[in-house]
Structures are given as structure tokens and as C-alpha cells.
Amino acid sequence: MPDVLRLTLLGIGAMRSPRYRPAGLLVEWRGRRVALDGGPGATPRGHLDAWLVTDERSELRSSLRVLAARKGFVCCAAGFAARGLRIAPLEVVHTSHPAFGYRIEAAGRCAVWAPEFWTFPEWGAGADVMFAEAAGWDRPIRFARGVGGHMAALDVARKARALGVKRLVFAHIGRPSIRARDTGARLPYGEWGIEGRVYRLR
């Protein structure tokens, strides 16, 4: 059987989502299991080899610390490498303090976990699959005092297509995007993430 990079969406919600669990991803490769973000209700079962986060100062940091500690981890923004799997943190423009996305590579395939950003991370260009920001729908969400925010989902879709992202999955869905979905709005590129769905790269 060929090696398969398994990527399971633990949740797809933006902060205080009325519908979804917190955005999170479980990466599995050759027996290694690494969690990225998540939170209450979006915690992977079974053993983990690492628990990484995109923002060490996020609103969920206290909950994540408790959940990770139960599995013996201190969750942090860091890299991971084992058995041909490489998970590298790369900076994103998002807020006034450092924030990251992750480039996940194994057997020549590449996935990107970048659930929050103000500016599209060009290091995600050409990814086989990218899990991306969708807090806003047709307008960006600007933080107070101009310290960043969330790029609009429609702009993310256009930029991802222009940069050759092969499969775009929206995995940080905020209220404006939920309202747009409920009224039948269509994405120009990409798809909505589904909690619990497994995305496979061979």
C-alpha cells in the first residue's frame, strides 16, 4: 500500500462560532500524529506526537493549554519532523504579535494549514491542498488600531487560484461566511471544509 498523508479536520469554526467547533487539523503519516490548533470539542482522540498552534496568544490559549496538558504537551508554534514528515511554521500577517501557518510535506506532496491571515501567505503557492481563512466573506475584517485582521474569503479564493493552489478548503469559517452560505452564495474557487472529513494525499 502506498504511503498516505491523512489530514482530518477537527473543526472549522472561527472564534465563538455559533455552528462549528474551533478550527483544527490532525496530521497522520506513518504512525505519527500531530495536532494543529483545535480546542474544546475539536481535540483528537488517541496518542499524539506533537500539538502545534498558529497563535500562542489566541483567545483559545487557556483552553488549549489545558487540553494539551492532558495529553502531556505544551502546545506551541514549532516545527516537527519524523519518518519523512516535515511540518514547518511559517509567518503570516495577521495581528500585532507573531502568528504562523504550517507547510506540511511528505513524499513530495504539500499541504498548508493557514486558518487565519490578513495577507495571503505566498509560501502556500502551488500546495496540493490548502486549509485557509474564511472569517469574512466579501469584506476583510480589520482589527482595531489597524493591527491586521482577516482576509475576505472571496479574496482568498481568487488569490489561491492565481497562485496555483490545487485544492482550497475553507477551514476557519466566520459569521459573515456562514450567512453567505445560508443564502446560497457561491465560491469562485475552493470548497467549504467539513468537520471530521479526511483529506488524503498519496
Image (spheres, rainbow, N blue to C red):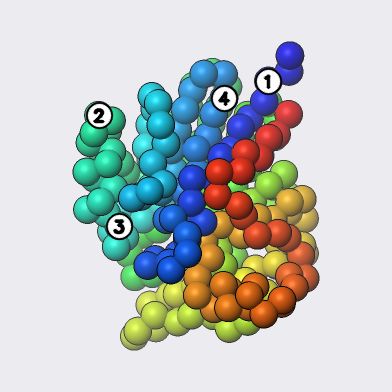
The residue where tag 3 is placed is 60
Disc 1 and disc 3 in contact, CB within 8 angstroms: no
Disc 4 and disc 1 in contact, CB within 8 angstroms: yes
From mark 2 to mark 3, how far is it between C-alphas? 18 Å
Q: Residues within 10 Å of mark 2 (few under 14, many from 20)?
A: some
Disc 4 and disc 2 in contact, CB within 8 angstroms: no
| Residue 125 in view in this figure | yes
**Circle number at residue 89:** none
Along the line of sight, which residue is nearer the eye, 172 or 148? 172
Q: Residues within 10 Å of mark 3 (few under 14, many from 20)?
A: some
Q: Earlier in the sequence, mark 2 or mark 1?
A: 1
Along the line of sight, which residue is nearer the eye, 149 or 175? 175
Q: Secondary structure at mark 3?
A: loop
Q: Secondary structure at mark 1?
A: loop
From mark 4 to mark 1, how far is it between C-alphas? 8 Å
Q: Earlier in the sequence, mark 4 or mark 2?
A: 4
Q: Amino acid at mark 2?
A: Gly
Q: Residue at x 65, y 68 (%)?
A: 156
Q: Earlier in the sequence, mark 2 or mark 3?
A: 3
From mark 4 to mark 2, how far is it between C-alphas? 20 Å
Q: Residue at x 29, y 48 (%)?
A: 64
Q: Amino acid at mark 1?
A: Asp
- Would residue 54 be found to the left or right of residue 119 on screen? left
**Circle number at residue 72:** 2
Question: Please, is residue 176 above or below residue 86 in the view?
Answer: below
The residue where tag 4 is placed is 29
- Where residue 183 appears, as percent x and y from the top left, is 67, 80
Q: Secondary structure at mark 2?
A: loop
Q: Earlier in the sequence, mark 4 or mark 3?
A: 4
Q: Earlier in the sequence, mark 4 or mark 1?
A: 1
The residue where tag 1 is placed is 3
